[in-house]
Image: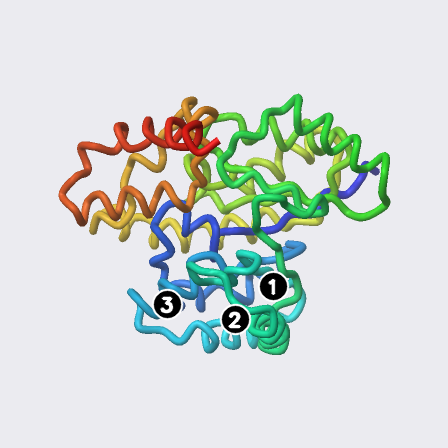
Amino acid sequence: MGRTIRFMETILRDGQQSQIATRMPIDDMLPVLEDLDSCGLYALEVWGGATFDSCLRYLNEDPWERLRTIRSHVKNAKLQMLLRGQNLLGYRNYADDVVEEFVKKSVENGIDVLRIFDALNDTRNLKDMAGVLTPEVAYELVGEIKAATDLPVQVHTHGTAGIGQMTYLKAVEAGADIIDTCLSPLAEGTSQPATESMAIALDGLGYETDLDVDKLDAIAKHFAGVRDRFLADGGLNPKVLEVEPKALLYKVPGGMLSNLISNLADLGASDRYNEVLAEVPRVRAELG
């Protein structure tokens, strides 16, 4: 029996943030929460990132109530959130005491794992939010970390540049313990590699995943209907499904790309998408 690779599922947070700008309401999640909880996943990412803002600004939901509702249905899998460091879930730095209390309240309301997002990512949580971690670098990086610590290594990437699956495979070969994936209806493109596909591939290579692929398939059918609704009403722009090798140059996170597309549409400037992306590395260079 091969080494066990655990999966962290992103469709309730980063997957949907990366493709539909975090517009999925809780009603689309409720029918499958208990199934997600019982199919062998290590964790579900359900909160943090842009979910707090989107719940209040677009979905008329209480983000705290959303978290408590999800927790009431999920008893086995860990619940994970993305915390933007000192910015918490907002867009400015908050005082230390506010940060400390927010973290305490997040845990009290159901969060088990807090992934800290900042420019100097914690090495226990290798987070490649723009999909620019290449396979050879992932192999070297994970290998060096595993050689230095017994802590579990969880790797995160996006499919934007078309190399996410290869990156995960090399990370696993180097000793990664957990990978972040998204169920197929909202996978790939600016999101993560597909959960089902990675599970089948790793199983074929002799690894254990502890996943119930048949149950995952049934859950995916539910989210396929959600995806189709967003495609029909324009909430899912086909641009986020494309492979964009230039992401290796632009280095823009998947969740930012989906929101950029939405913001440009609101401004009547969708035709300037590529122009805006091309400006990113120039601004980065000018700022040193």
Q: Along the line of sight, which residue is nearer the eye, 163 or 99?
A: 99
Residue for badge 2: 70
Name the N-terminal-most of marks 3 and 2: 3
Tell me if mark 2 has few (under 14), some (14-19) or many (20+) residues whose alpha carbon lies within 10 angstroms of its own: many
Q: Secondary structure at mark 1?
A: strand
Amino acid type for the residue under numbered disc 3:
Cys
Select label 1 or label 3 by which is in front. 3
Residue at 59% over, 46% down: 213
Residue for badge 3: 55
Amino acid type for the residue under numbered disc 2:
Ile
Q: Position of residue 185 (x, y in %)?
A: 41, 45
Residue at 34% over, 54% down: 226
For the residues bearing labels 2 and 1, Cβ distance under 8 angstroms? yes
Q: Along the line of sight, which residue is nearer the eye, 113 or 228?
A: 113
Q: Is residue 14 above or below residue 55?
A: above
Residue 79's tag is: 1
